[in-house]
Image (spheres, coloured by chain):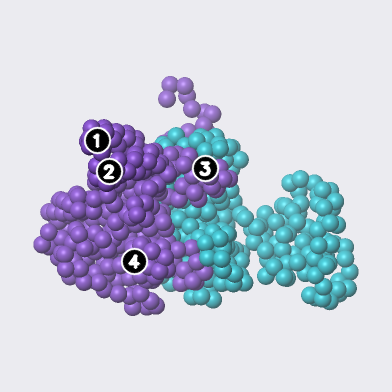
Chain colours: A purple, B cyan
Amino acid sequence: MKHYLDFEKPIAELQRKLDELRAHSESVSLGLNLETEVALMEKKLDETRRSIYSNLSPWQRVQLARHPKRPYTLDYLGSVFTDFQELHGDRLFADDRAMVGGFARLDGRNVMVIGTQKGRDTKENILRNFGSAHPEGYRKALRLMRLADRFQLPIITLIDTAGAYPGVGAEERHIAEAIAVNLREMAVMRVPMVAMVIGEGGSGGALGIGVTDRVLILENAYYSVISPEGCAAILWKDRAAAPKAAGALKITARDLLELKLVDEVVPEPLGGAHTDLEATSQAVRQALSRHLAEVEALPEEDRLSRRYEKYRRMGHFVEDPVTPHADAVSPDV
Amino acid sequence: MSDSRFKKNLVPPAEAPSGTKLPGSDTSALRKPKLSDAPRRRSIPEGLWTKCPQCGAMLYDKDLAGNLEICPTCQHHFPIKARARIASLTDPDSFEELDAGMASVDILQFTGVATYVDRLAKYQKSTGLKDAVVTGVGRLDGRPLALAVMEFSFLGGSMGSVVGEKITRCIETATKKRLGLVIVSSSGGARMYEGMFSLMQMAKTSAALAYHGRAGLPFISVLTNPTTAGVMASYASLGDLIIAEPAAMIGFAGPRVIKDTTQATLPPGFQTAEFLQEHGLIDAIVPRNHLRERLAFHLDLLGAATVPPTARAPGPEPSQPAPNRTEAG
């Protein structure tokens, strides 16, 4: 059974009619030729799909990023990478299944891949904690990154999380520190690092594995400082204002590219990554490979200073060192 | 914690005779003081007196300010302004502010219920600051140090581009001049109005701290009420030493979010400084009136005492370190 989002209803409706028409022409042999009707319907379906998917609102993209059929980290580990060997645990407390990682090969080169992992059904979601990692997940990620750094393996991270887990245990084991340490240590890893937001880029939980030489993002993924619902609840006092918040926060791939907060938007097939895993995987592999080759080509010192500068430059402000009082500004400045 | 607060409220020092109620003997009385409080509170002249929310003592504002905003009766720590905090931690006239004129811009043209521009204007007026942090270099009993103090009353101490940039420059200045660094945090987290630019300040400040640490310089993070979310998940958690003020609320996610997400009962004292210390997450809890001496002690111990003891008077040139550490000046 195909899963349709609300805004995909017109497509679902047309698809249903088309299916009916086809079934009808097969089962009933009245000598009527329905081929023209089928062709017309197909054309209309195609046009509708095109018009809906090429004009997606930020909120619609958020829904696509959260689509239950969307490819997750382990899907790409099977389709983009080869020879994945999972490594478990943070050597301190637990193996956080919301964060996976291990050795893999990308276009023939050995890499370390780390990513947040959602579950496909209820049972797996309980195991994966809906893709929201605990401190152990971030500490496992750091352990694997340090391992990679020590043995000169490039690091690739795949980001798909609504955020780090807000729970009592997470606080007791200091999730804030786990994320903070990752941010600091990722800034000074000597090996090349590339991150890709493949679904949800949920705030600090995403950034906790996202401080890298290059940050790529899939076309319908989003990356935000706070969930649209959370922002709506605080600034509009109403979670139902989430679509508005999604627009105001500028969280879509295109917006982030325009704001120079990501390096490249990786295109998805029409209708979203889940409609064609093979095509999506090919685009993901090519983008990862290309960016990795580019940062690998840089001398280590250069790569580190560029990484520092990349984040150093992010931010917008005005400076007015001579006039502490706004009223005193002369009219010609 | 809440128990003792209620009990103390039952017996306001100003009026009720003590010892008339057995502690915890009844719950019906819990509501009583609220009713009788209302008319009394109305009679308090604005801006002169403050009632301690913990012990109920009536405190003269000037006395409170003179005591670093600590209740003399029960040691409750009221919020303290960034400027007053800086004065309490630096030698007179030694603090040189950095980037005082830096101000936020509405890069996303954010319009929620209120526009970002309006919010900024409102808080700039009410706080007299351009944004939610004051940074600079100064001296603590003669020791040069880099100091950043966040101002919670400016948009909840939220971190946008200006807070991130000023903190980063302060760290970089400390690295360049080989200074120990103290950051006093109080923040609700990242500033939503600047979207992803706010989130990226976490990476920016943490990266700057990586290089400050690599230079062998000490960073002491002071957590005050409240320090949460994006600030807690970046520089505030990265101190070589992490010191908290008593009863400060400290955490990553807000208690309401945790409750709503997990349906769990939160343990008593959850996300307080005391809770964090018990769980091994911070080095020490230090009352505000002892912070200065404690910082001095730690900075000495960690090697940032760049001025020999004999020279420990407010020097004429605050940025001139002692001879044994002069390579960067």
Please identify the quadrant where the C terminus of chain A is shown. Answer: top left
The CA span between labels 4 and 1 is: 57 Å
Residue, disc 1: A32
Give me the residue at 19% from left, 58% from top. Answer: A80
Outermost residue, left direction?
A108
Q: Is residue A85 left or right of B164 when viewed as pictured?
A: left
Check chain identity for marks 3 and 2: say if they share one: yes
Numbered circle sitting on residue A28: 2
Residue, disc 3: A241
Dot 2 falls on which chain? A
Give me the residue at 72% from left, 70% from top. Answer: B3
Residue B107 in the image, given as x and y percentages of width and height? 41, 36
Closer to the eye: label 3 or 4: 3
| Residue type beneath disc 4 | Met
Asked if labels 1 and 4 touch by Cβ distance under 8 angstroms, the answer is no
Dot 1 falls on which chain? A
Quadrant of residue B14 within the rendered picture: bottom right
Name above or below for residue B283 compared with residue A154: below
A229 or B13: nearer the eye? A229
Which of pointers 3 and 2 lies earlier in the amino acid sequence? 2
Please identify the quadrant where the N terminus of chain A is shown. Answer: bottom left
Q: Residues within 10 Å of mark 1 (few under 14, many from 20)?
A: few
Asked if labels 4 and 3 touch by Cβ distance under 8 angstroms, the answer is no
Give me the residue at 22% from left, 37% from top. Answer: A31
Name above or below for residue B235 compared with residue B98: below
Residue, disc 4: A99
